[in-house]
Image (cartoon, grey):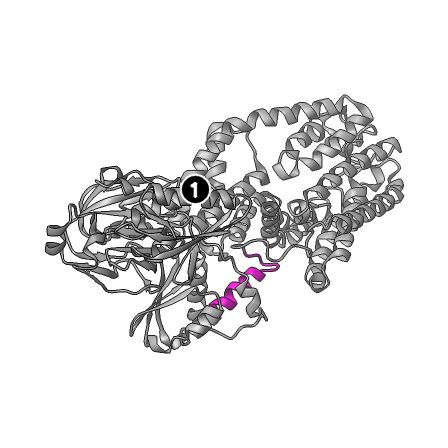
């Protein structure tokens, strides 16, 4: 879970980079400063579309290749979500939370469906193009769900805001705490609306009545401000101090990289009071620090209230609002010492907690905890993959030798100019489990289930002429790659080994097989004598009398093909083996040739049990029955 | 500990006898191995045992290591004699 949050946090670094500029534009363009609506609008629209920007950024961050297709899916996800929510209830606002959900879902769907294949007439919608389509459908359902789940939650927050108004100093503190704590789910706007724009009323000198803390404060109500004043110490001092602590605790080699970011987001908070860049930079990476931040905000509001400070802001609690409203505030100077104290507390707590609990703030993240992620900030998983792609290409004889790269579940399938120059040793050194030279121009490299990422990385490298490695990833790093093959059964990767009629295992007239003691399986009433491999894998066993052969697939599935019943008695007569033990095979490769006339005349049955000997406890479901040609896929499923 | 056997079932240690033997020792926690012609494999793996291609008349050794090693070999021995797979050598 924490790793998942960290991934969100890392993905946000990219979109967060746009925020300081947006904050400055909107603040400096505002009526009370340059009064240039063009400028204000330019910044405002960025902040207003923060959820959309986050959705795009997170989708890209989650996509294994940071692909543009994922970005499009992220945008689609968010506009579908907001559109659906509006259709149900126009008052629903999920804000940034909606953006995060949309981005995560779009990114995950991208990784799942980017290479989906359809029949030819639908192929235009296959692969990456399918991702926004499926994303739209999924988000429609998600939006529908939230459309009914969210209004009650918004209602509770509204009630909490009303409670806070009526409970003096404690209420002020609770409000401050909730105001920050609710930012990740975007509900702080609900509570702010209650307090800032609805709480209390004040009649100005010209007789108009205004409601809410902000309006009353700006119109000169001397009692306004308890729910506002305490934000100045947080935004001008506390959060910038937190940035300093995060900078000082960053890894040495990352300091320069994160330093620039921390300076700009700290200055943004100090000057404009826009704190989202800071908060989002650590909220997902270290949720516990964000909780501390929420508590401290509550305390700061209580302290300012207790000191009798009445200050406020039309925009946010930064330096600009502080200066502009200096004249109409009560005891504004007291905010400076209070701010310094708050800043010191923030620095001390953040520094202590980060070191003590090894919290993963920006510049301290684990570089390799995500297998398929990539981030603009670190990206070292990418480096390993990239290095592996480089070495595999070199092992295959360099970019000139590779004509086409394709892949199945576990293997690279290559068209090459000359398969004899493929360096098997080198490929194995860099993570290949086996190499199969099928012909002069055809080869397969067994990689494992991570093959899709490698193949895509290789394609990118080939498009760029396989440039030399920039990073210094060593061979050891590459070899540490997962050694466990996935055991999930994929029906499309298992083909009919011989033409004949599929029957359930229970119909095989030999108890040794039909009772399932050897494992689950099925039978084939064979109609042809050419037995082929149903899987991509290796021959592990050929019984001396040649009537039974054992295979293990690249993904670890054991398959025993027992040709006919009681055929052991023929002692090899009528069987001709074409492969040897330990030989690599692919689907469709001929394994054994059977003299059907001879065999059928000498044994009771030609029923051929196919047993999955290491799938004990699982069940085989027949997806097809009756007569099937050799090579037909999707005949069984195993669960 | 270990015990020697001579395989007497006419088809050797093939599908049915092999399955019976594997099923008999699988419940035990000990490591159980069968060796033939200086090759030893896990007796809990059907594919592994069949890969040995043990013919009739062959001399094999079943060995076990672990807490219930003795019981595992005991069980294997009883299956081998009761199912006419072989006899103790």
Identify residue for label 1: B75
In depth, the one of B88 and A276 nearer the eye is: B88
Report how many numbered discs are placed on residues in the image. 1
* Relative image position of residue A283 (x, y in whole percent): 67, 44
Query: Toward the viewer: A112 or A189?
Result: A112
Q: Quadrant of the C terminus of chain A?
A: top left
**Could you tell whether A132 is left or right of A595 in the image?**
right
Could you tell whether A171 is left or right of A535 in the image?
Answer: right
Q: Is residue B87 magenta?
A: no
Displayed quadrant of residue A437: bottom left
Q: Where in the figure is residue A628, as x and y percent of width and height?
A: 19, 47
Report the residue at 76% width, 24% height from top. A203
Q: Is residue B81 left or right of residue A14?
A: left
Residue A453 appears in the picture as rendered: yes
User: What range is drawn magenta here?
Assistant: A374-390
Going 73% across and 63% down the picture, which residue do you hit?
A252
Q: What is the magenta segment's predominant secondary structure?
A: helix
Q: Is residue A464 visible?
A: no
The image shows residue B17 at horizontal and vertical percentages of 32, 46
Residue found at x 20% / y 52%: A567
Q: Chain of mark 1?
A: B
Q: Is residue A381 one of those drawn in magenta?
A: yes
Residue drawn at x 83%, y 37% is A328
For disc 1, the neighbor class at 10 Å (few under 14, some 14 to 19, many from 20) is: some
Mark 1: which secondary structure?
Answer: helix
In this view, the residue in front, A503 or A437, is A503
Q: Residue furthest front?
A: B89
A497 lies above or below B84: below
Quadrant in which the N terminus of chain A is drawn: top right
């Amino acid at each position: 879970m924490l790793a998942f949050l960290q991934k969100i946090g890392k993905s946000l670094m990219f979109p967060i980079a746009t925020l300081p500029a947006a904050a400055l534009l909107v603040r400096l363009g505002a009526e009370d400063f340059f009064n240039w609506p063009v400028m204000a609008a330019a910044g405002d629209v960025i902040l207003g579309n923060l959820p959309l920007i986050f959705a795009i950024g997170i989708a890209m961050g989650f996509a294994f290749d940071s692909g543009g297709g994922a970005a499009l899916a992220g945008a689609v996800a968010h506009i579908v979500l907001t559109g659906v929510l509006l259709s149900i209830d126009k008052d629903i606002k999920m804000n940034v939370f909606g953006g995060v959900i949309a981005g995560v879902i779009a990114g995950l769907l991208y990784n799942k469906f980017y290479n989906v294949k359809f029949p030819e007439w639908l192929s235009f919608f296959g692969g990456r193009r399918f991702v926004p389509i499926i994303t739209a459908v999924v988000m429609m359902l998600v939006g529908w769900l939230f459309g009914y789940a969210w209004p009650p939650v918004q209602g509770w927050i509204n009630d909490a805001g009303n409670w806070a108004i009526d409970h003096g100093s404690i209420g002020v503190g609770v409000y401050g705490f909730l105001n920050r704590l609710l930012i990740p789910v975007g509900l702080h706007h609900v509570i702010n609306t209650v307090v800032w724009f609805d709480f209390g009323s004040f009649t100005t000198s010209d007789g108009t009545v205004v409601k809410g803390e902000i309006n009353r404060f700006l119109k000169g109500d001397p009692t306004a401000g308890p729910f506002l004043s305490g934000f100045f110490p947080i935004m001008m001092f506390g959060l910038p101090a937190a940035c300093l602590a995060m900078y000082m605790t960053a890894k040495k080699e990352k300091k320069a990289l994160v330093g620039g970011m921390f300076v700009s987001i700290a200055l943004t908070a100090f000057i404009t009071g826009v704190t989202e860049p800071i908060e989002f930079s650590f909220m997902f990476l270290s949720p516990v620090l964000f909780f501390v931040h929420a508590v401290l905000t509550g305390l700061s509001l209580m302290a300012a209230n207790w000191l009798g400070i009445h200050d406020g802001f039309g925009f946010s609690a930064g330096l600009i609002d502080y200066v502009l409203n200096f004249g109409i505030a009560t005891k504004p100077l007291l905010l400076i010492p209070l701010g310094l104290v708050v800043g010191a507390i923030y620095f001390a707590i953040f520094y202590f907690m980060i070191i003590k609990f090894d919290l993963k703030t920006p510049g301290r993240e684990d570089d390799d905890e995500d297998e398929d992620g990539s981030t603009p900030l670190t990206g070292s998983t990418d480096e390993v993959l990239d290095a592996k792609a480089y070495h595999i290409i070199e092992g295959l004889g360099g970019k000139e030798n590779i004509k086409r790269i394709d892949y199945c579940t576990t293997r690279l399938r290559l068209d090459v100019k000359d398969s004899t120059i493929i360096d098997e040793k080198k490929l194995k050194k860099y993570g290949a489990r086996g190499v199969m030279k099928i012909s002069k121009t055809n080869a397969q490299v067994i990689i494992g289930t991570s093959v899709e990422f490698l193949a895509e990385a290789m394609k990118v490298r080939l498009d760029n002429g396989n440039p030399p490695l920039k990073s210094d990833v060593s061979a050891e790093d590459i070899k540490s790659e997962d050694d466990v093959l996935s055991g999930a059964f994929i029906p499309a990767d298992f083909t009919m080994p011989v033409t004949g009629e599929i029957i359930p295992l229970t119909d095989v007239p030999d108890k040794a097989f039909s009772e399932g003691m050897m494992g689950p399986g099925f039978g084939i009433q064979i109609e042809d004598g050419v037995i082929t491999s149903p899987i991509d894998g290796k021959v592990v066993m050929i019984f001396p009398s040649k009537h039974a052969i054992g295979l293990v697939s690249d993904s670890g599935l054991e398959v025993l093909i027992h040709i006919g019943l009681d055929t052991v008695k023929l002692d090899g007569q009528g069987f001709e083996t074409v492969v040897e033990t330990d030989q690599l095979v692919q689907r469709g490769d001929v394994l054994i040739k059977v003299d059907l006339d001879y065999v059928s005349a000498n044994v009771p049955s030609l029923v051929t049990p196919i047993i999955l000997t290491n799938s004990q406890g699982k069940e085989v479901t027949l997806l097809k029955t009756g007569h099937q040609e050799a090579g037909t896929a999707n005949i069984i499923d195993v669960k | 500990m270990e015990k020697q056997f001579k395989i007497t079932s006419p088809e050797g240690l093939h599908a049915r006898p092999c399955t019976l033997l594997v099923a008999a020792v699988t419940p035990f926690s000990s490591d159980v191995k069968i060796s033939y012609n200086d090759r030893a494999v896990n007796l809990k793996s059907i594919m592994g045992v069949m890969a040995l291609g043990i013919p009739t008349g062959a001399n094999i050794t079943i060995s076990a290591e672990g807490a219930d090693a003795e019981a595992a070999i005991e069980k294997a021995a009883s299956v081998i004699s009761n199912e006419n797979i072989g006899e103790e050598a």
